[in-house]
Image (tube, coloured by chain):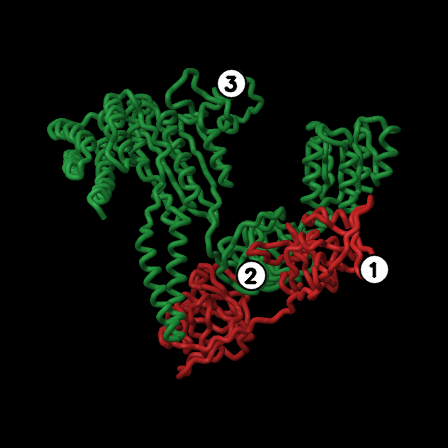
Amino acid sequence: MDLKDLFFKEFKDKISVIQKGLTKLLEDPSDGKAVEEVFRAFHTLKGSSGLVGFNNFQKVFHRLEDYLRRWKNTPADPTITTRISEVVDFISSKEMDLTEEDIKDIEDILEGKKKVKRESQTIKFSEDLKSFLERAMDNLVELESSIISQDRTAISSNLRSLKKLFFDFYEKIIYIPIEEIVEGFDRYVLMDATELGKKAKLILKIDSQARVTRKHAEVLRDSLIHLVRNAVVHGIEHPDERKNKGKDETGKVIVRAWIDSDVLNVVVEDDGKGIDVDKVVEKAKSIGMTETDPFKVIFMPQFSTLDKASSKGGRGVGLDVVKSAIESMGGEIEVTSVKGKGTKFHIKLPVGRYLKKVLVVRRGEKMFGINLSDVEEVISNPEIFELEGKTYVNIEDKNYIVKDFNTNEFRKAIVAKDSAVAIDEIIGIREASVKSSLMDIPFIKGFAFGLYRYPVPIVDPSTMPTKGKESIKRKRVLIVDDSPLTRIVLKRTVEKLGYEAIEGSSFEEGKQLIEKKTFDFALLDINLPDGSGIDLLKLVKSKDRNIKVAMITAEDYDVYYPKAKEYGADEFIQKGEAIESLIRFLEE
Amino acid sequence: MRVLICRASEKAYVGFNVKEVVGVGQFEVYEIPQKPDNLLGAIVYDGRIYSVVAINELLGGKEIKTFVVLKNGFAVGVYDMDGIYKVEEFMEVEGVLRENFERSFMLNGTTVYLLEDKFFSNLPKVPPEIEIDIKRHEETIEVFQKEEKSGVKAFLVEVDSEKFVLPKHIVKEVQNINSAGKFHYGNIYGFTYFEGNPMPVVWKKPVKNAKWIVILEDGAIPCTRVQAEDVKFEKSDEGTFALVDGIRYKVYNEGNIGELLRWI
C-alpha cells in the first residue's frame, strides 16, 4: 500500500468521525467535545494531505479547521455546520487531490450558493474481498495437498470449509443490512430541519435481520432519503406551530424496518401535520385528474400540492418516482395519513434467501413444498366442516379456509397465511436453494432446487385453489372487448354467477391471455382496434375445442353470425340483449 | 414455540423445537468404526456428518423410517412425522424419563416429550474427522440413445396416438420421464430441469405410457416413443412433411410449446 492509499484509508476513517461529530453539533451546537473531535480530524487530514502532496485538500481542510477553531469558544452556527457537512459529503467520494473547480464548488457550498445532491450517494461494498480471496486460496492449497496425499477425511473437511466460506461470502455480496442503508439519515434530518428553521430528530427502529439485496440497495436508499426529507420539509411543522398544537417542539421522523416471511417491510412515518386530503383532491380536480383517492393521487406524476415552485418540490413531487422505483423491484408502497397527526409510508419489498427451509409434502400424486417460514402449524386429523359451499377446518376455535389441489378427503392440514392447505403426508423438511418462478402459474411462487432429480414447486397458500363445492363450479371466463363499460358489465355478470373473469382490451391482449391461461368460456367482441374477434375465436378453438365461445357485438347479426358459426362459435349475442343471453349462455 | 412432533412408536410421541431442526428426511445410515453403544451410526446431510441416535428403546420400539437432523450435530431416528404445533405450555417430566427429558406437553390426550439438551448431553458425537465410506445409491435411469444413423435430422415422436416429426434444431434434449416430478395442473403434468432451470412438462391430456420427455424452447412434451431419424423434408401448401420409412408425417417447426399444442 503506497502513501496515497494510506491517505485515503485514513481519509475514509476520519470522514466518518467528522460526519458523526457534525451530527452531534446539529443536535447541540454547544457540544464542545464534538467540536474538538471534528477539529482534530480536520487537523490530522490537513497534515496527511500535505504529506502526500494533495495541496488542494490541504487548503480545504485548513479552511474547515478554522471554522471549528472559532466554535471552541462560541456555539456552532447550525447553518455553517450544515454547509460543512455538505462539503464533507462532496469530498468524501474523491479519489485524487481536489481540482481548482472542486475548490470553487466548495467555496460556493460554504457561502450557501450551491447545494450538494445527496440522493445519489453510492452504497459501497464493504466486504474485504482481499481477505476472502486469501482464505479461499489457503483452503484450495490445503485441498490440493489433501487430494495429492489421498487423505479423504481432509478432502472432505477442506471442501466443507470452502463451501462455507463461499456461502458466507455469497450472502455478504448479495445482501446489505438496512442498518447500513440508513446510515447518515440522522444528519440529513437535522440539516434539512435546521435550514427550514424547524426542529426534528430521526428515530431508527431497524431489526438487525432486515436486509435488502445489494442490487436494490441504492434504489431503496434513494427512495427512503426522499421520504425522510419529505417528512421534514412537508410533514413536520415549525416549532411554534407544534407548540400551539400541544406537540413537542421537536418533530419525530421514525424509520422502522423488519422482515416478515420473505418480505422486507420499511416504514417511514412522521408526527407532523399529515396530508391535507381536501387540498389534494381539490388540486387534483383543478389539474384535470380523474382519480379522486388522495392517497393514490399523491403518487401520480402530474401531482403537486405546492402552489409555488420550491427547490425541494411538493409532497407529491417525486413520490411517483419513489413508487415506480419500489414497483420496479417487485415491491409496493402504501400511504396512510391523519390530518394533524402525521403520515406513514409503508414499503414492502420481496427479499429472497439463498437457502430456505422448505416443508416438502405430498397430496395425491403431487409433491410440493411450502416455505417453512410461512408454516404456522401442521395439524393431523383436523375438524373439517362445510359452509356456503366452501370447506373449512377449525383449529383452536379459529376457522381456516381449506386450499386443496384434490377433491378427495385429506388427513393433515398446513396452517399458513390464514389458510389450511390439505395434504396427505409430510415428506420432510429440507434446506434448499429456492428460485422465483417465471411461469404463469398463480400459486407457484418458486422452485426448490437440488433436493431431488427434479425441481420441487413451492406453492403460495394464499393463491391456491379453494376446496369445496363452490370451487368445483368456479370456472374461468375470458372477456375481450375494447369498451371498458362493456367489460365492466360482462365482468360483473360473470362474477355474480360465481365464475372468475379475466379481461383483455385488445386483440393482442386477448391473444396473449389465450396462450398463457386456460379458460372454460370466452366472450369475444368482433371488432377490436387491432384485429378481429373472429381470429381470436379461431385461436381459442384451436387451443381447446371444448371452450365455449360467445361472440358479443353490436355488429349486424346476418353479416357476422355465419362466419362466427363457421369457426365454431357457440353463441352470438348482440350487445343490446347482452345480460340475459349471457346468463343463459353461461348457465346452460 | 413451534414444535415438530414425531412418532417414536405406536403411542409415544416426541417433539423438537423447529428452530433447532436443520432437516427431516430419509438418509443412508453409515457404519462408523468403534461405534459407541448408544449411537446407530452416522448420516451425511449437506456435506456434514451427524451422529444418529434412536429414541425407540426409551419409548417403545417401532422401526425408524425418517431422521430429524438437528443443529447440535445429532440426527434422531423416528417412525414418522405427525405435524408441527404451536405449544405455549409445558409440564415438568417426572419419574424414570426425567433422566432424558425435562419438559413435555399434552396433545390430544397424549404426552409428547420434548427432545432438548438433556437428551443429548450424555451422548457421544461422531468425531468430524472420521472417515466413513459414503456409498452413492443413485437410482439409474435409462438415458435416451440417439441411433447412430448418419445425418440424424429429426425426431419422430409418438404421444399416445399422435405421431409427428420434430426437426433436430428445435429439440433441446430428450430425457427419461423419471427425470420429471409429478404435478398435474391444467395442461402441466410435471416439472423437470433443463440447463439448471425448471421446465414444465405439458400436454393436452394425461399421457399414460410416457417414457421420454422432449425438451423444446419453453416446455417439454411427454412422449411414448422417440426415434432419431435421418429424414427427407417435403414442403407443400399444407405445410412441411417428413418421410420416415416411406411414411409421411407432419413436421412441427417452431420451438414454442403453446404453438405446438395448438398445432396438434
* In the displayed structure image, the side of residue B212 where residue B244 appears, left or right: right
Q: Residues within 10 Å of mark 3 (few under 14, many from 20)?
A: some
Dot label at residue A360: 2
Q: Answer yes or no: is residue A395 visible.
A: no
Residues A518 and A279: in front is A518
**Callout in the foreground (2, 3):** 2
Q: Which chain's residue wears label 3?
A: A
Q: Residue furthest left?
A: A73
Quadrant in the picture for residue A78:
top left
Q: Earlier in the sequence, mark 2 or mark 3?
A: 3
* Residue A177 position within the rendered picture, expressed as x and y whole percent measured from the top left: 37, 46
Dot label at residue B246: 1
* Residue A542 position within the rendered picture, expressed as x and y whole percent measured from the top left: 78, 44
Secondary structure under tag 2 reads: strand
Quadrant in the picture for residue A366:
bottom right
Residues B26 and A419: in front is B26
Question: Are dots 2 and 3 on a single chain?
Answer: yes
* In the displayed structure image, the side of residue A7 where residue A285 appears, left or right: right
Q: Amino acid at mark 1?
A: Gly
* Residue A340 position within the rendered picture, expressed as x and y whole percent measured from the top left: 40, 26
Give the residue drawn at x 28%, y 38%. A95
The chain letter of the red chain reads B
The residue tagged 3 is: A282
Q: Amino acid at mark 3?
A: Glu
Secondary structure under tag 1 reads: loop
**Callout in the foreground (2, 1):** 1
Give the residue drawn at x 83%, y 58%. B247
Secondary structure under tag 3 reads: helix
Query: Where A117 falls versus A168 (above or below)?
Result: above
Asked whether the residues under the numbered discs 3 and 1 touch, taking CB atoms below 8 Å apart as contact, a structural biologist would say no
Q: Answer yes or no: is residue A543 visible.
A: yes
Q: Amino acid at mark 2?
A: Val
